[in-house]
Image (spheres, rainbow, N blue to C red):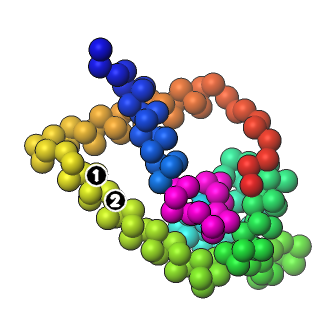
Amino acid sequence: MDPLLIDRLLQIADLFQKDMGRAFAGTGLTTARVHLLWILQHSGPSTQQSLAQACDVSPRNITGLVDALEKTGHVRRTPHPADRRAVLVELTPSAIETMTRMQREHVELDASLMGAVAPGDRDAVLRGLTAISSHLERLVADAGPRDDGPSS
C-alpha cells in the first residue's frame, strides 16, 4: 500500500527538521530563532511588538527569543528614532552574512529539489503544493490559536 499524502508531507517535514538541526548544530539557533532572523532579514529593524505579531508569539516569548539571539550576537537592540519608549531589533553584520548564506543555500536546495522532478511535471508539482499549502493554512486558521508556551 502506498503511503498517504499526509505521511509523505510529514516525512518531508521531518527531513527538513533534521537538516536544520544538522545545519545549526553548535550555533545556538533553533527553528523559532531562525524564523525571527528570517523576519528581520526581510522586514528590516522592527519593534519587539511587531516581531511578536509576525512570529505569532506572546510579547514574553519574543523577549526570550530576542534575548537569546542578542546573547549569541545575532541581533542588537537600538533606540527607536521616532519613539523614545521603543527599541528596534536589528540583525548584526554577522547575522546578515549568515542569513545571506542561508538564502543562497535555499536557492541551491530549491534547484536541487526541483531537479528531482521531471521537467514536464514541475508546474503541476508547484500547483499541487501551493493548493495543499493554501488549504492547510485555511484549516489551521479555522482551528483558531493554540498556546504552546515558550518557544525560544
Residue at the far left in the pictured view: 120
Q: Residue at x 69, y 47 (%)?
A: 56
Residue sticking out furthest to the top? 1
Q: Amino acid at mark 1?
A: Leu
The magenta stretch is: 20-33
Question: Nearest the camera: 138 or 16?
Answer: 16
**Is 96 placed above or below 149 here?**
below
Q: Read off the residue under disc 2.
A: 109
Q: Please name the residue shown 21% across and 48% down the image.
A: 116
Quarter of the image containing the N terminus? top left
Whether residue 88 is visible: no
Q: Secondary structure at mark 1?
A: helix
Query: What residue would you read off at disc 1?
Result: 113
Q: Is residue 95 magenta?
A: no
Check disc 2 and give the amino acid type: Leu
Looking at the rendering, which quadrant does residue 6 occupy? top left
Few, some or many C-alpha atoms within 10 Å of disc 1 (few <14, some 14-19, many ≥20)? few
Q: Secondary structure at mark 2?
A: helix
Instruction: Out of 79 and 102, give the one closest to the viewer.
Output: 102
**Residue 120 horizontal/vertical position (percent):** 10, 43
Q: Residue at x 82, y 61 (%)?
A: 63
Report x, y in % for residue 35: 60, 57
**In the drawing, what numbered circle is on residue 49?**
none
Residue 33 vertical position relative to residue 46 in the rendered view, above or below: above
Q: Looking at the figure, which quarter contains the C terminus?
A: bottom right
Q: Position of residue 138 (x, y in %)?
A: 51, 30
State which quadrant residue 31 falls in.
Answer: bottom right
